[in-house]
Image (cartoon, rainbow, N blue to C red):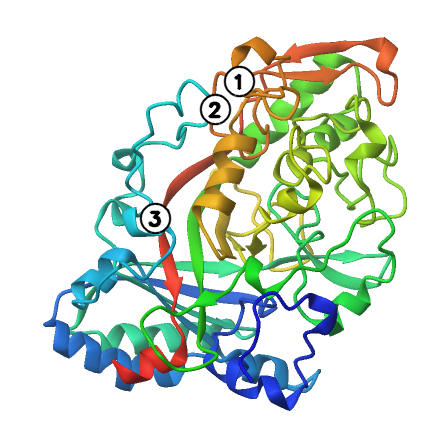
Amino acid sequence: MPVKLDTPAEEFDTADPRLATMLGNLQANILKPHGRDFARHVFLRFTGSPSSVRAWIRSIVAPGVTTAAKQFGTPPGTDGGVVGGFFLSAKGYQFLGLKLSGFGSGVFRKGMKDQHDGLFEPLLDTDNKDPEPGRWEPPYRNEIHALATFADDDVNVAEAAAAALRASAAGIATVLTTEHGNTLRRHNPLTNTNDPVEHFGYFDGISQPVFTRKDFLKATSRQRWEPGARLSLVLVDDPLTDEVDAFGSYLVYRKLGQDTAAFADKVKALATSIGVTPEVAGAMVVGRFKNGTPVLRAGAPTGGTENDFNFREDVPGARCPHHAHIRKVNPRGTTPATSLESERKRRIARRGIPYGPPLPGVADKPAPDPNPSLPRGLLFMCFQSDIGDQFEFLQRTWVDNEHFPTGVLTLGAFHTNTGDDPLIGQNADAAQKWPKKWNDEQAGKKTVNFESAVTLEGGEYFFAPSLPFLTAL
């Protein structure tokens, strides 16, 4: 019986033998993060004949792609080996002589470099505010056809897998660049685990949509926020195969540089300007304290990474500002003129990994490096069923829109100086309005332009094809 994409998380049991075909056809890391600490991302531009590239993908690449069946079938505590993934851009499909008409995401068909805005988007403040492709890092200015990823808990194993792929691509493709990802981990005393953090020092990956029954049941408290999601949030039928239960997903890849020194200076300046501690100022930027405590719930770090909350508890934004990162990207029931269910369909499945060594005090591993000028950042990756309705909507209509969410419309007539997302926003002129005192609406707010210390360095839109497509090329 074909798998239905409207299946909710609580009903999707990966141990069900009726799902074996579907999971065997699907790439790993889509429905659940692979959890490996090291990754290599190899970007390719095809140069061989289309027939030779097809044969290379079929015989060399496809056998190294990890399936969701293997990911979910590996017993806990055992080494599941390298997690391999392979993704094609719209230009990559065209190079292979394949039509794009079956891909429902128009944004994918255009590609990330196409920053053309519609007639009304500038008026509605939903235009593209990313840096122009000519300012991206040189490798990303090229036409990118494919991305191959390799992840493992042993850095040497991940590197060896990437090296083998690069060697096999001789005469088939030009390697544009290889990105080196490494998870940062810091001990979490609340759970006695070593949890992921990002370079600014905040625990990361706390709030994610979950797609399986096992992960759904782990979220024991679901009174104010429901983390479960239907498969349709990330999966679509692979349009280039007729096999049953052959699904794929659209992948957004963005290399985001993080200026750690600038961020620290900006947090201190904000704290001085509005009269709070740097710890509180940083929490108002992110929406959480560094230990994961939601600033919605407390004016100081307390119990840690709570996720059962919604922003209806703080409509005025006196505790968690309307522009705080976690509120901008996931308003949790406070988006004007829409339903909670419609809002939840904008969610994305984040699968990124940091790059560069941590500064001292940020993470317990890998080894820190005190040099503040070393390249650091995030190799941002997210899966979804439609890039335009999910990632691009989040980035343009919510994150970079200075009128969201306090304006019913996005026109200036409703503007109350929300500002852009101070953490990842790319709208340099959109100042934010900050509470002068936590949880005191009467204390008023002050306008301060906290310009993001995160910069887009390059990227592309891809599709994660099914295994039947890859093996039949």
Q: Which residue is mark 2?
A: 427
Q: Nearer the viewer, residue 449 or 12?
A: 12
- Pointer 2 and pointer 1: residues touching (CB < 8 Å)? yes
Q: CA distance from mark 2 to mark 3?
A: 24 Å
Identity of the residue drawn at 49% across and 57% down: 385
User: Where on the picture, by quarter, is residue 406?
Assistant: top right
Q: What residue is rendered at 71% in x and 17% in y?
A: 434
Say which label, 2 or 3, has the lower sequence index: 3
Tag of residue 430: 1
In x, y percent, where is residue 466? 40, 75
**Residue 54 visible in the snapshot:** yes
Disc on the earlier residue, 3 or 1: 3
Question: Does residue 171 appear in the picture of this structure?
Answer: no
Tell me the kind of residue under disc 2.
Answer: Asn
Q: Is residue 337 above or below residue 217?
A: above
In the orientation shown, which residue stands out farthest toward the left?
Answer: 49
Q: Secondary structure at mark 1?
A: loop
